[in-house]
Amino acid sequence: MQSGKATQIQLDITSDLQKWRAFLAIAELGSLTRAALFLDSNQSLLSRHLNALERECKARLFNRTGRGVALSDVGQRIFPLVKALLSDAEQLELEIHGDAREPSGRVTIGSLPSITNPIVGRLFKQLRERHPGIQLKILEGSSGQVEEWLADARVDIAILYRYGNVLHEQEQALATVDSYLIGPAGDRLTKAPEIPFSSLHELPFILPSAPNGLRTALDAMARQEHIMLAPALEADSLPLMRSTVAEAKLYTVLPIHAVWTEVQEGRLQAARIISPPLQRIVSMALARTKGPGRAVSAVASEIVSIVEDSARTGMWHFGGPT
């Protein structure tokens, strides 16, 4: 090692990185409450960290609003520097612990049940083979719940349905899926490979209750096509919808991957809805303040690979709408 002068670095305000970790979480989530939940801390402790930082900086870092907090001019100016500092510190820790070469840590995925079923088993198997240091946690819920988990950073990756061609910022289109009229075995209507949307008029349906993305899209298209949708039963449980269609001879509307096994085994039938078609996008979003970065990226990459491979079976169309 060369001898000479030591590097002259003065540390005062930046000597406590935990305070700046709190600053980063609050800035990205826009709320002390959400930041405390993400950091597994409590709001009063984060408030003390923030007050201490503002005293040391001799400047207000956030402006309090009715909906939370927003970065002040000073906060906006230092935000990218703080993020870079903490990213470098994280990389140093990975190097010290020897984890830099292999992704590790827990990655939490929030998803809708109809999307989880065809993905998670294979995802777990591939991660165990390729990235054994990664642990998965799966949360299933409604679209609203998954959106809330993503906003609160309770999940690292969210997989959602989007209707229309516009995705939210920072989202990636994984696949485009058609909607199918699902009926019981031996049903006349769903025996055909395709069926016009007008044929759904006054059928006895089991459908999810509002508010729900699919229900909203169905109702809007029904008004546009001047037909009446008549749900005989409302239920938000996918297994219940599948079993009720088979046993009570009702109909429902689902993407084919949600009933893939049942259709293959002949327990349900599916006819693709056309004229007009009802499509949705399967999108993937990463939390703005996500968990172990390399592990999240590895899991996201595996999800994309699985979706692309499943598209070859006809389960969905890979990527966004054309």
Image: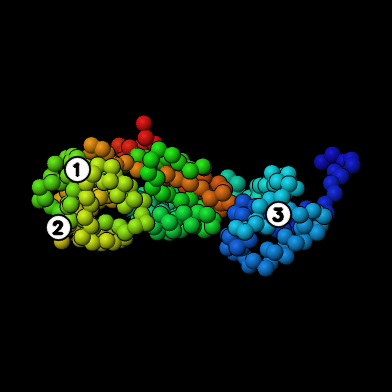
Which residue is at the front of the view, 167 or 298?
A: 167
Q: Is residue 248 left or right of residue 127?
A: left
**What percent of the width, then of the height, locates residue 288?**
56, 49
The disc label shown at residue 62, or none: 3
Q: Nearer the viewer, mark 3 or mark 2?
A: 3
Residue drawn at x 18%, y 52% is 202
Q: As drawn, which residue projects farthest toward the right? A: 5
Query: Secondary structure under badge 3?
Result: strand
Residue 12: image quadrant is bottom right
Q: Which residue does the numbered mark 2 point to in the structure image?
A: 249
Residue type for callout 1:
Ser
Query: Secondary structure under badge 1?
Result: helix
Q: Nearer the viewer, mark 1 or mark 2?
A: 1
The disc label shown at residue 198, or none: 1
Which residue is at the front of the view, 167 or 302?
A: 167
**What percent of the width, then of the height, locates residue 293?**
57, 48
- Answer whether residue 152 is visible to the viewer in this image: yes
**What percent of the width, then of the height, locates residue 294?**
55, 46
**Marks 3 and 1, how far apart at CA:** 54 Å
**What percent of the width, then of the height, locates residue 318?**
36, 37
